[in-house]
Amino acid sequence: MREPTTEANNPIEQEFLSVIREYERVIYKVCYLYTHPNAPLNDLYQDVVLNLWKAYPKFRKECKISTWIYRIALNTCISFYRKEKNVPEIISLTKDIDRTIEAHDPINEMLKQLYQMINQLGQLDKSIILLYLEDKSYEEIAEITGLTVTNIATKLSRIKDKLKRMKKEE
């Protein structure tokens, strides 16, 4: 009988674990946008990591590893979200941040409002603005989402306008 180990035994496993450690926060951010009571964050995170593991041997390094991770993470989260028959009410992106925000810190309050507004966007818009806020170029966003660069530019402009309108309506 084989002994269970905590360390990876082969170079591919070690390489994969290293990649996951490096991009763990990115994966959690993407999962956080799609989490709700029926899809706990850690469950969604595990689904993404599992899908990354399944796809890792086929990764051809034709794009940046971060682009590939975003693509798999977004597709996993969106697929999971679509499978849910009962779409729950919107969950605040700042659920855990609320406890750490100081009472009258204007920057944190603005950030909290921004996350709440982003959470009201559709799935694709959420994905695009998340990537934009992560300082991804239009080309990288297009590669991750499968849209054209022109389409990304147009969508981002509309998303920004929508967010501005939401801010004015408050």
Image: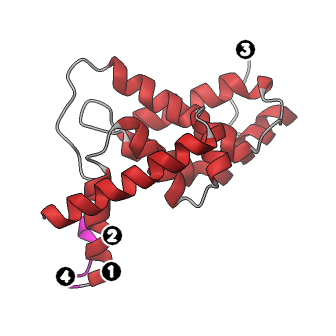
Q: Nearer the viewer, mark 4 or mark 1?
A: 1
Classify residue 67 by image quadrant: top right
Inspect the image, locate mark 4, and give the three-letter code of the amino acid beneath it.
Answer: Ala
| Distance (Cα) linking label 1 and label 3 | 57 Å
Callout 1 touching callout 2 (CB < 8 Å): yes
Inspect the image, locate mark 3, and give the three-letter code of the amino acid beneath it.
Answer: Met
Callout 3 touching callout 4 (CB < 8 Å): no
What is the magenta range? 95-104
Image point (30%, 53%), residue name: 162
Q: On the picture, is 92 further left or further right than 126?
A: left
Mark carried by residue 103: 4
Quarter placement of the C terminus: bottom left
Q: Nearer the viewer, mark 2 or mark 4?
A: 2
Provide the secondary structure element on which disc 1 rests: helix
Q: Which residue is mark 3?
A: 1
Q: Which residue is mark 2?
A: 111
Q: Position of residue 50 (x, y in %)?
A: 58, 27
| Distance (Cα) linking label 3 and label 4 | 57 Å
Q: Position of residue 123 (x, y in %)?
A: 37, 36
Residue closest to the far top: 1
Residue closest to the far right: 11
Image point (19%, 32%), residue name: 88
| Distance (Cα) linking label 2 and label 4 | 13 Å
Q: Position of residue 91 (x, y in %)?
A: 23, 46
Quarter placement of the N terminus: top right
| Distance (Cα) linking label 1 and label 2 | 6 Å
Inspect the image, locate mark 2, and give the three-letter code of the amino acid beneath it.
Answer: Leu
- In this rendering, the answer to whether 37 lies above or below 114 is above
Q: Nearer the viewer, mark 1 or mark 3?
A: 1
Q: Which residue is mark 1?
A: 107
Q: Upstream in the sequence, badge 1 or badge 3?
A: 3
Provide the secondary structure element on which disc 4 rests: loop
